[in-house]
Image (cartoon, rainbow, N blue to C red):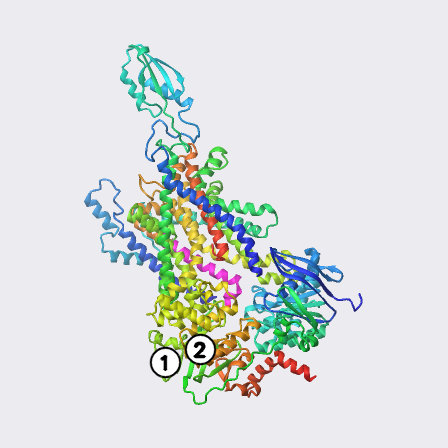
Amino acid sequence: MIEAAINETAARKGRLSITVSLAILILVGLACLLGPWLTPHSYDRVYRDYVLVGPSLVAHPSAEELDTSLAVLTRRIHADTSSYERHGGSLHLTLTSAKPIDPRVLRFFDHSDLFGPAQIIPGETNESTLAFDLPIRQTYFFFGTDANGRDLLTRTLIAGRISLAVGLLASLVALLIGVAWGATAGYLGGRIDTLMMRIVEVVYALPFIFLVILLVVIFGRNFILIFVAIGAVEWLDMARIVRGQTLSIKRRDYVAAAEALGATSSAILWRHIIPNAAGPITAYLTVLVPRVILLESFVSFLGLGVQEPLTSWGILIADGARNIQAPIHLLIFPALFLGLTLAALNQLGENWRDRTGAGGA
Amino acid sequence: MDKASPVLAFKDVHVRYGGNEVVKGVSFTLARGEVTAIAGESGSGKTQTMLAALGLLGPEASATGSVLFEDRNLLALPEGELNHIRGKRIAIVFQEPMSALDPFVPVGKQIAAVMRRHEKLSPSQAKARAIELLDLVGIPEPDRRACAYVHELSGGQRQRVAIAMAVSCDPDVLIADEPTTALDVTVEARILDLITELKTRLGMAMVFISHDLGLVRRFADTIHVMRAGDIVESGSTQQIFSTPAHDYTKMLLAAAPKRTSRVPRQDAPVLLEARDLCVTYTLRGGLMSPRKEVRAVDHVSLALKQGQTLGLVGESGSGKSTLGRAILKLVAASGHISFEDRDLTGLDRKAMRPLRHQMQLVFQDPFGSLSPRMTISDIVTEGLRVHEPHLTRANRAARAAQALSEVRLDAALLQRFPHELSGGQRQRIAIARAMILKPKLVVLDEPTSALDRSVQADILDLLAALQKDHNLSYICISHDLSVMRAMADDIAVMKEGRIIEHGPAVEILTAPKTLYAQGLVAAAALKDPENARLLQLLQ
Amino acid sequence: MLRLFLTRIAAAIPTLFAVVTLAFFVMRLAPGGPFDSERGLDPEILKNVQHAYGLDLPLYKQYGLYLWSLLHGDLGPSLHWRDFSVNDIFSVALPISMQIGAEALVFALLCGVPLGMAAAIRPYSWTLWLARIVTLCGIAVPAFVVAPLLQVAFGLDLHWLPVAGWEDGDWRHQILPVFTLALPQIAVILRLTQAAMRDVLSAPFIRTLRAFGLPASHIYVHAFRAACLPVLSYLGPAAAGLLTGTVVVETIFAIPSLGRYFVDGALGRDYTIVMGTVVVVALFIIVFNLFVDLAYGLVDPRVRHD
């Protein structure tokens, strides 16, 4: 009775935390899943005129960008002067030159990312003067652009797909292998158990990164193989935990009762051991998923992860880290997403572990 | 301070956890040198009341009211002042010494630490005093034992250490919270002797908390009976035992479960026979100690007739549970077992399977014997899936409902989970799970030890009724002689893996031959309230 | 104690053997060889070079030869850095990795344990918040995010610390790498200590200490002894985690140590370097875990007698 009352107050505090973490995760997940289709940019579209642009809520081009761009363009077409007036969303541009101006120079303006197709105004145009209306193409880059002029927001969201997918899939692989291995070893015991856990020990003697690097180097940078490699390395801890759980559950009276009833080993494993180990298994999953996502980022950072055109948060952060002299937004935004995901997952995990009383870091 | 004023006065003490009130206005006084017992079952709030007095409740609890000690309200004292009283003027002995003592520090040092805190002794003085105290509480070779760690001592010795720590600073009040509940019967008797002797020698007042009224009869002056946070009856020991007023008190005092009149047939066929059973465990060595071989069951032979009940009595570590499981072939054993003239000795797991429905097991701990993730229906019908796989789901459900009604439970419970039921209900489910297979033999491993007193009698009645209806044979394993008295036809007394005495129940219970069995019977008799009442009447 | 030591060493040998074998054959599975990047190498010369390194022998013979030289402590010649043997390279690179790793571990313990205890005891209201923030940073901000940020802040903007490089162990060059490496471990150690302390403080034997009027300081000291056990158990995985982290940290801060050589070796199919790293790392982890187990036995008397 007393314990129930204590748990009641703790549970209420935990529930808020769980809701917030879940909300964050769902938002990030939805954003990464649906976002790339909703943004006006595609993740590989290059904007040559918008390289390394900073994040901004205001539409591009800004007044400075207009001036700079016009100056560059004017020089390129060898015009002497240009002046412009702004009418709302378009410019009224007048070019003058000593030599005659070929109307085809308007193509330069068409190719620019800042402007739409130009419309010549016949009234004001003659041989050495070209007057035209130039609509300004409004573009938004909320997160800015990268060194190739690609929209960072879309790329971050697309990268999220890969990072989250690898995280979930590799965790699933680790879960399946780990549970099967650990439960079998724990329940059968004896020499089989010793052998199986020896194998775990051997693989465990190598830190994960070395193993993953080795596997990736050998099997190449294939998307599926990467998450198999990560899963193949991360199942070890899960196997240990499941084996530990199996050993302690094996001694419980309800397992002995099932044996007295005559149930088969597999029936006992399925009906009693695994369902009762589900608590700590799920608790460890919430540690595993962020670890896997982090490991994938590490590997991608080292240049051994998924290949172009696919991208992941690790690759984006690596780009940002390499250009530390450049504006820092390249690093911040993908790092923010990664950090938010990791933090929410960890918080969720902690609360889950508090509720079920399962320990372990 | 005159002699008449009480040393401890509880006045309207309430303890709350959030919205739950677990102690609802408790008031009583304790005079100098008086022994008062607080009796009640689990959840009655008896421990919470005393913890509140010493300020040992957790942060989620709030205590109101007053507990006066030397004109100071303990509930209102700041921690610093309270620390001068705790351990020095008021000391406490907890129920479970293994967890109550520090596992990382040798026991002598723990006692010394308390004395150095309160009595300003030097380290060597404190150590010498600690050894004296260990000797006082009856620990052999106290100077050697003082360097031992808690896990190296036996249960009884650990509790002696806890008692030594409690009396080290000569307190005015000693609170003993179920100090013998976790101990074996014979050890229990000796610890009680120790406590009463110390009390007389040191002149302490004592609050003795227990769920067992019969236990406290010998030395308590007054008794308070608590139930669900309230004191329902108070009085002198004599009053409570001779003229109990409240129904609850009467229920607690009720004699041990009655023996149902049942005469087992003498010509019944032999159902089970075991010869020379041995079960050996190898303890794997720790960091420093080598491997050891332990004989849990040492050349045991017995026979059981149809419709008969064999009682296995012994203390913890006697091997009785292991023997029960070895008979059911749940534990590897050497020796010969035959069931209904069929030799089970050589059968492997697969061959045993079809026979299992005839021999079932009911466990001690109703909390642990039901899988927490399965519904009651699944739990009860699990055996049917193995032995009658042709049954449809509807059939199984019908059989489950039938099984539940046999154990006097409502079929509506089938969809619930174990944690939603009470201890007594869970034990009935465990019995139903065994009975649904229509077994001939059921091994009952301490079937009522984990249950409250009020529930125990019901369960034993149920078991007796089922035996009569189905002509079952029982092997009833227990350390509690009153259960034996109710259930057993024959009794085998076990000690360290061997059967040291075997005979009809009546004989063993009234005139045991071996010294060990005599000790068991004597210790049990001390606690028996019916016995106590008889003695009371005779005086 | 001695018995445990010997049995563990006896158990470690087959493990080490299995690790070496596994790595050897897995490495050879990779397509390509150590000399693929040599541009325009004459096939004749290529054959000679391969023969010089014994790479044209059947695989099992190479394996046997490698084991033999391993038993003599010789890790073989580096196939990539031709003038050096693996032992030469490691004698420089290994101490650096060890130094950074050890400093990071000590730093993580010095930060994490007191913060964790404070978070559990909560002497001031802000201790819990500080612990939360530190934990969050360690978990959510990986090494390769922290490092560049620190490089920009302390190296480029404030000019307090060098951005990268090792300069033979100059103390200023050690600060950023060690801190970056330690940060995630601080978070884990903090959380472990906090949880363990919280559990211990509600344990029955602590209640007994309070019941006997022992002061708070005494209680915390005794609680700490029980609370440090999970951290002790974690030291093994912590070492493994630090080794993982070094690979990234060394890359970012351009430190010439084990991780760098391993990655380059793996990419360049430098068999001996890769094998050498595997052997050294596995050996280190096994030995480290052994010492952790012994230390655990020293702290917890229950384990000693079992």
- Magenta: main secondary structure: helix
Residue that sits furthest to the left in the current view: C44
Q: Residue at x 31, y 56 (%)?
A: C22
Q: Is residue C115 above or below residue B506?
A: above
Quadrant showing the C terminus of chain B? bottom right
User: Does residue A332 appear to the left or right of C47 in the view shown?
Assistant: right
Q: Please state which of residues B411 and B537 is positioned toward the viewer in this rendering.
A: B411
Quadrant showing the N terminus of chain B? bottom right
Q: Earlier in the sequence, mark 1 or mark 2?
A: 1
Q: Is residue B27 above or below residue B509?
A: above
**Disc number lying in front (1 or 2):** 2
Question: Pointer 2 indicates a residue of which chain?
Answer: B
Q: Would residue A87 be seen by someone viewing this image from the given angle? A: yes
Q: Are marks 1 and 2 in contact (CB under 8 Å)?
A: no
Q: CA distance from mark 1 to mark 2?
A: 17 Å
Residue underneath mark 1? B344
Where on the picture, by quarter, is residue B219?
A: bottom right
Where on the picture, by quarter, is residue A266?
A: bottom left
At mark 1, the secondary structure is loop
Q: Position of residue A271 (x, y in %)?
A: 39, 64
Q: Is residue A343 above or below residue B54?
A: above
Q: Amino acid at mark 2?
A: Val
Residue that sits furthest to the right in the current view: B2
Q: Is residue C289 magenta?
A: yes
Question: Pointer 1 indicates a residue of which chain?
Answer: B
Q: Please state which of residues B23 and C173 is positioned toward the viewer in this rendering.
A: B23
Which region shows up in magenta?
C277-304
Residue underneath mark 2? B442
Q: Amino acid at mark 1?
A: Leu
Q: Position of residue A61 (x, y in %)?
A: 39, 25
Crowd rating for badge 1 (residues with CA inside 10 Å; few <14, some 14–19, many 20+): some
Q: Please state which of residues A90 and C210 is positioned toward the viewer in this rendering.
A: A90
